[in-house]
């Protein structure tokens, strides 16, 4: 019996991602997860979320000169958008939530994705969870999301 947890994720192809400048393979299982926030408006449906994701990719690649989006996955309410290539921070898994005060649905999506990552061997079962502010001089991921991280329980 396969006990792996699965999560439905909108893939790069489905959201119309631009090809990354390079593709770095994450060494699995990843030992840490870093949570960010995108500080964008709430999106009411998948099309609005995809439009925001395309905006983020453009901003990261053109304005910040990243090779792609700086996150592996993004959670917009209950939508997970992923398979994001990245060439920075290859020693950890980067996840962004669209709101500094996340909804229960967004937090549930984060938890399900992380459990899926563990069950499929992409994340180490003893991974550490950090807010971006734990690793640099920033207020990211915002006080509300940062406080919520303490309440995410994993088996």
Image (cartoon, rainbow, N blue to C red):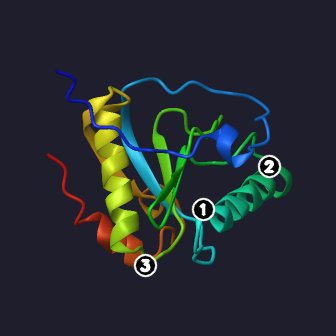
In three-dimensional space, the C-alpha distance between marks 1 and 2, rounded to whole angstroms, equals 22 Å
Q: Is 140 on the left or on the right of 145, as rendered?
A: right
Query: In this rendering, is residue 74 above or below 89?
Result: below
Sequence-wise first label, 1 or 2: 1
Residue at image location 36% in from the left, 67% down from the top: 105
Q: Would you identify the image quadrant in which residue 22 lies?
A: top right
Sequence-wise first label, 1 or 3: 1
Q: Locate the C terminus and report the quarter of the image it occupies.
A: top left
In three-dimensional space, the C-alpha distance between marks 2 and 3, rounded to whole angstroms, equals 26 Å
Query: In this rendering, is residue 45 above or below 1?
Result: below
Answer yes or no: do the residues labelled 1 and 2 have beta carbons within 8 Å? no
Residue at image location 56% in from the left, 39% down from the top: 89
User: Which residue carries the number 2 mark?
Assistant: 61
User: Which residue carries the number 1 mark?
Assistant: 46
Position of residue 86 measured from the top left corner of the image (x, y, whole percent): 64, 37
Residue nearest the observer in this picture, 142 or 99: 99
Q: Is 4 on the left or on the right of 66, as rendered?
A: left
Q: How many marks?
A: 3
Residue nearest the observer in this picture, 104 or 45: 45
Q: Residues within 10 Å of mark 1 (few under 14, many from 20)?
A: some
Residue nearest the observer in this picture, 148 or 98: 98
Residue at image location 83% in from the left, 58% down from the top: 63
Query: In this rendering, is residue 17 above or below 142?
Result: above
In three-dimensional space, the C-alpha distance between marks 1 and 3, rounded to whole angstroms, equals 20 Å
Q: Would you identify the image quadrant in which residue 116 lies?
A: top left
Sequence-wise first label, 2 or 3: 2
Position of residue 129 measured from the top left corner of the image (x, y, whole percent): 33, 51
Q: Which is closer to the viewer, label 1 or label 3?
A: 1
User: Which residue carries the number 3 mark?
Assistant: 101
Residue at image location 48% in from the left, 33% down from the top: 91
Disc 3 on helix, strand or loop? loop
């Amino acid at each position: 019996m396969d006990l792996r947890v699965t999560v439905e994720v909108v893939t790069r192809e489905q959201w119309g991602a631009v090809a990354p400048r390079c593709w770095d393979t994450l060494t699995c299982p990843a030992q840490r997860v870093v949570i960010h926030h995108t500080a964008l408006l709430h999106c009411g449906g998948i099309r609005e979320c995809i439009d925001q994701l395309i905006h983020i990719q453009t901003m990261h690649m053109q304005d910040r000169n990243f090779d792609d989006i700086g996150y592996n996955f993004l959670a917009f309410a209950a939508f997970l958008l992923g398979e994001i290539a990245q060439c920075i921070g290859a020693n950890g898994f980067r996840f962004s939530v669209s709101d500094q005060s996340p909804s229960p649905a967004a937090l549930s999506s984060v938890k399900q994705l992380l459990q899926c990552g563990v069950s499929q061997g992409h994340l180490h079962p003893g991974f550490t969870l950090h807010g971006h502010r734990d690793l640099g001089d920033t207020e990211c991921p915002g006080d509300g999301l940062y406080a919520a991280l303490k309440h995410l329980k994993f088996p």
